[in-house]
Amino acid sequence: MRQRRPRINWFFVILVVILIVIVGYVDRFILPTEKSPFLDTPTATKDPESFAVDAEALFEQGKLQQSIDTYMEAIRIKPDDPALYTALARVQIFAGKYSEALVNAENSLLLNSNNAMTQAVRAWAQTQMGDYVKADDSLKEALRLDPTSGVAQAYKAFLYGKMYENNAGPYTDPIATAIESSKAAINLAPTSLEAHWARAYIYQLTSNAELAVQEYQAAIQINPNISEIHLELGVTYKGLGAIDSAIQEYTLANTYNPSDIRPSLYSSRALASIGAYEQAIQYAQSAVAIDPTDPYLHGNLGYMLFKHFDWPESATELSLAVNGGETADGVAVKILPLTGGDTWIAQYYSTFAILLAQMNRCSEVLPLAQQIEGAVPNDQYAVYNAGYAVQLCASSLGTRTPPARVTATPSITATP
């Protein structure tokens, strides 16, 4: 007897073959393109051009540090692009980071030494750092590479203006060159922020404050979000006696750069010039809050408190400036050196001498008065006030209110 062979189920065979084909197709073509739920999702990398566009937009909004960070990210992705280093250096100069700007300008020149704009930006950084001879050489090279560069002419106006302002550099009459360069900048680059800024600066140097205001306003129309330009416009308004306008510009400068102590410092002095000492004290306190380690700011606050007859508080702040020490919060403050470069410093010292005499602390007055007379003998206000403090002690007038001459505000050379 023989067993019957089972019949083949062809439907089942075909179904199995189809399933095998489907599984093979999925394994070969579908699964490799699918993301595993157990792996991190990769982030798409932006191209450096996109970062550069974002960085320029941030600069236009006055967000300088964010612009700097974005340019640095672009450089991380594409470190061989000289244009990125140049653009970064320019923004860093606007942000007051001059040494960093110089490094990046020179990094750009290592990649391309024949770029006129990079040479010009390097010159601007060198100018801000006081290296006028090297800045002059850089500008000569920039204008050799591109004689029609209005921005380079603007930087040249800044350079020669700084030489004139600080009585430095190799030229006997730098202001004439500064004037011509500022005119050339406007003619060659009438829509450039730097061109109008440079022209305003030269107008200010040459005692044409009203014209300086117009040029600063033209620069602000190009970009209304740059702190430094609002700050300088405020200084110009203060020189014209337009204190309300000055305070408005200082406030805008603070809005765009809250970490800068100058808007608060300048506001306090502008208000003190019209006798608004309570408000001046508030701004002086704001400046100290930004940088409580700075003896210059403590001296400014002490001076404003003295003018408001808050003598104990004034003595505390002026002592921090003159003698150094620690604040009530334990912040260390170094001694502010007495030099002839900034007459406000001499004013802090001489005001402290008078205050000590008024508070009958005469043992401290004579050595301080001798220090003032020895360090700044040509400062008539400081020397007079120091001598007056000695007279107060000699006459035992420790509680008398200071006369009007003592409270006169000196002419300022270093800061507004």
Image (tube, helix red, strand yellow):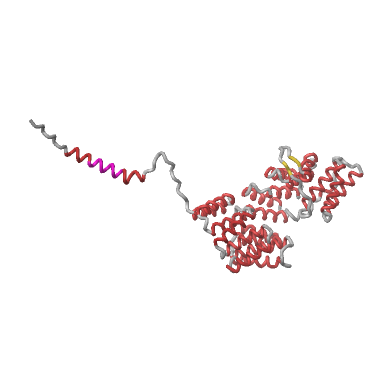
Residue at (67, 50) in percent of width and height: 250
Q: Nearer the viewer, residue 302 or 378?
A: 378
Does residue 87 appear left or right of residue 253 in this picture? left
Q: Is residue 23 magenta?
A: yes
Q: Nearer the viewer, residue 259 or 332?
A: 332
Query: What residue span does the magenta drawing correspond to?
Result: 17-26
Whole-percent x, y for residue 191 in the image: 58, 62
Is residue 416 among the parts visible in the rendering? no
Residue lying furthest right in this view?
Answer: 395
Does residue 345 appear left or right of residue 86 in this picture? right
Is residue 406 among the parts visible in the rendering? yes
Q: Is residue 302 magenta?
A: no
Whole-percent x, y for residue 94 in the image: 62, 55
Does residue 246 appear left or right of residue 17 in this picture? right
Q: Quadrant of residue 3?
A: top left
Figure check: 138 above or below 288: below
Magenta segment, principal secondary structure? helix
Q: Quadrant of residue 279?
A: top right
